[in-house]
Image (cartoon, helix red, strand yellow):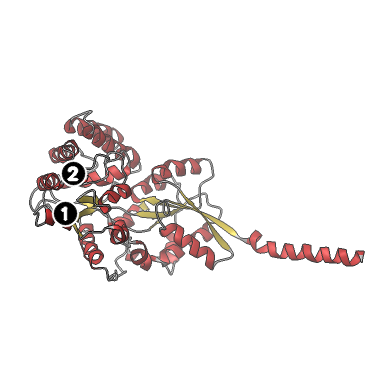
Amino acid sequence: MKLKTIGLMAGIALGAMGMAVPAMAQTVIKVWSIDGANSPGIGDTLSKEFNEQNTDIQIDYRIVPFDDLVNEALRAFATGNAPDIISLDNPDFALFSSRGAFLDITDRVAASEVIDTENYFEGPLNSVTWDGKLYGVPKYTDTIALFYNKDLFEKAGIAEPPKTWAELVDTAAKLTDPSTNTYGITFSARAGEEGTFQFLPWIQMAGGGYENVNVPGAVEALDYWKAMVDSKSASQDVLSLGQWDSTGTFNSGNAAMAISGPWELDRMSEDAEFDWGVALLPTQTEGGERSSALGGFNYGIFANTKYPDEAFKVLEFFISQDERLFPDFSSLPARGDIALPETGVPLKDAALKVFQEQLQYAQPRGPHPEWQKISKAIYDAMQAALTGQMSAKDALDQAQATIEGII
């Protein structure tokens, strides 16, 4: 009886060891991204699916808030605690690549049967390239345009969306109705990258750029923004809201226009109980120079990963799902070899065509290794002017001086 018990216990122990072997043999790849913070996104969804399909490699996925992502990643890399893979906003890539924080994957990509650099648009591909080498892969791309509430436009007797900056201010004023708590427009002017993302195109339409932010037209644009805030034609929380929340104001019918991107199309289709459309961003003058922000995120593998081969396999899996980016996540592939299917939702399909046209005018933020500091100079100036601390000219002059000291 004792021998049988010992034998039984030994069998249980061996069985337990046998069950533990796969777990011990697993390679865990840590992935950081902002996806999943507001709703199911690319990173969290694909990580879950990868784990369901694999036993030898598993993803440990973590959501990091957008505003914390860069600083937390830099600290993690400096202390040896970085994830294996990170998804970063495209202008932040140069900061990490130039510091040797990302793995050079040039040769791996060249040998890959999944990733082909020939398929990518020039702008997104340039954002993952540093000193002639490839340090990442574009995840998706996007831009911003003008959403507008067709029902409110019709009610106000306005036939079409504004085409110039002056028309935008005038239209926003006509659509503002305090009695129904309706603002003419909403956007994100918060003190962060989203604020820069939304305002930089106006600087570019005025003939400037991140190296020369105080051109006369940029001052004019910022004065227009302040006029809308001061007159309460713009939602009064634009100084603190991110793009997701500001567009929520539009979705609820509390703003007649909103500056936002294609990532909102699914939510818009589901939540907006009115007829809506999308128009190109208005220009400084009729037929003037167009611009829009080049958005989108990239994937990078940290240089100090213990599992470069396994991390690259995860990366290849992510890229292999690119055809799902728009149908499943309302994100635009950064590649020209993927045809976007019609969704069967007329409003969404019409909006997509506008965003595809707007992308033709999208300009990158940077790239520059010190983009975070440059961006801060821009959104600090925007905030200083909109809160009345400084005139638009003085604020942008100060930003220009700061940027010149950086670059």
Q: Quadrant of residue 232?
A: top left
View extreme (top): residue: 389
Tell me the crowding category of disc 2: few under 14, some 14 to 19, or many 20 or more residues within 10 angstroms, Cα based.
few
Tell me the crowding category of disc 1: few under 14, some 14 to 19, or many 20 or more residues within 10 angstroms, Cα based.
many
Task: Report x, y in % for residue 3.
Answer: 91, 65
Task: Report x, y in % for residue 58.
Answer: 55, 60
Cα distance, mark 2 to mark 1? 14 Å
* Label 2 sits on residue: 179
- The numbered mark at residue 258 is none
Q: Secondary structure at mark 2?
A: helix
Given contact means CB atoms under 8 Å apart, are the residues at marks 2 and 1 in contact? Answer: no
Q: Quadrant of residue 327?
A: bottom left
At a point 23% along the width and 28% down the height, the residue shown is 389
At a point 27% along the width and 35% down the height, the residue shown is 403
Task: Report x, y in % for residue 242.
Answer: 32, 45
Q: Of 266 and 207, which appears nearest the observer?
A: 266
Residue 80 vs 264, above or below: the answer is: above
- The numbered mark at residue 152 is 1
**Quadrant placement of the C terminus:** top left
Upstream in the sequence, badge 2 or badge 1?
1
Q: Of 77 and 241, which appears nearest the observer?
A: 241
